[in-house]
Image (cartoon, rainbow, N blue to C red):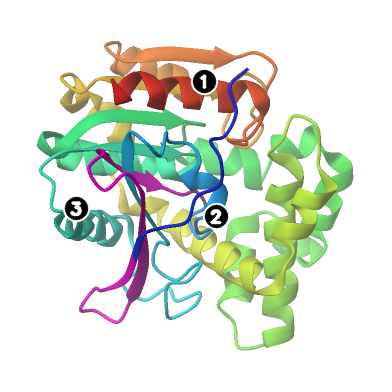
Amino acid sequence: MRTLYPAIEPYRTGILETGDGHQVYWEISGNPEGKPAVFLHGGPGAGCSPAHRRLFDPKKYRVLLFDQRGCGRSKPHASLENNTTWDLVKDIEKLRAVMGVDKWQVFGGSWGSTLALAYAETHPEHVSELVVRGIFTLKPREIAWYYQDGASNLFPDLWESFLAPIPEPERGDLVGAYRKRLTGSDPKAQLEAARAWSVWEGSTIKLLPNKQNSSNYGQDQFALAFARIENHYFVNHGWLEPDQLIRDAGKLRNIPGIIIQGRYDICTPAVTAWELHKAWPEADFVIVDDAGHAFDEPGILHQLIEATDRFAK
């Protein structure tokens, strides 16, 4: 089984001034003469980690990572203003100019797959390859499964903690009820809601639950950005037209690609990856039978490293 490449530090970092109130942190690592790639993290609102640099052979790739608006090292922290899918697509294009390349590999998982598809369908001429995993397209059905009724039936014990900040009369629309608290004026209620929202995801993204993962998601600063930004995007359905990303998958036809999906992904169930596969049959399609959602589950990680190695050639 393939695993992460050795730890590496970026050789160049910077801040992208968006012109509308955001300062977006970016970094470049690997070989300055290597194959260009951009890594799109999940959430939205999760930010990048040093492990994400290690998905690419540092001798062969030059990889740009960035913390999307409002999260990680980007500022202002947890900001929802001027923070939409299409703002992020514009940021990616500006960062491509920072790299000084015409085409680059686009790599994204979970929400990162959503953003990767949105970017690639908007700018297919600038995408050399597309690597996506844990496919999510912001359909109402996908949001309802994970935040209203669906995943709750598989994790009833953990679901009780997710319900806890929301009074019984408001539980018919949990995303809306969380919205009130995450954007409200009571900082205590805001943080309580942020922790509950974030820990729910951190507790359910792996095939075998991991207590350390849950703890990391419960850290105050991370949880506040993660929950506020995710909820903001979900309430607004990502500013996407109904079924837009699957509908427009024909625009990807000439882009070499791979779709990687965990069979037991509770966060983003495999049906959406299957729909993308049917709409974009030119891409390789890989189901990992012993995996959930997280990128570092052994089977998924193996397939991701295999993909970046293959495309490096």
Corner quadrant of residue 255:
top left
Q: Secondary structure at mark 1?
A: helix
Residue 135 vs residue 126: left or right? right
Q: Earlier in the sequence, mark 3 or mark 1?
A: 3
Mark 2, other Cα within 10 Å: few <14 / some 14–19 / many ≥20: few
Type of amino acid under label 1: Gln
Residue at position x 53%, y 60% in the image: 231
The amino acid sitting under disc 3 is Arg
Is 39 inside the magenta-drawn segment? yes
Q: Residue 281, can we see it?
A: yes
Q: Residues within 10 Å of mark 3 (few under 14, many from 20)?
A: some
Question: Is 91 positioned to the left or the right of 217 in the image?
Answer: left
Q: Nearer the viewer, residue 64 or 154?
A: 64
Q: CA distance from mark 3 to mark 1?
A: 26 Å
Res 96 label: 3
- What residue is shown at x 45% (from left), y 17% (from top)? 274
Name the residue that disc number 1 marks. Answer: 303
Q: Mark 2 highlights which residue?
A: 49
Count of marks overlaid on the render: 3
Q: Main secondary structure of the magenta part?
A: strand
Residue 239 locus on image (x, y percent) = 32, 54
Q: Position of residue 73 (x, y in %)?
A: 47, 71
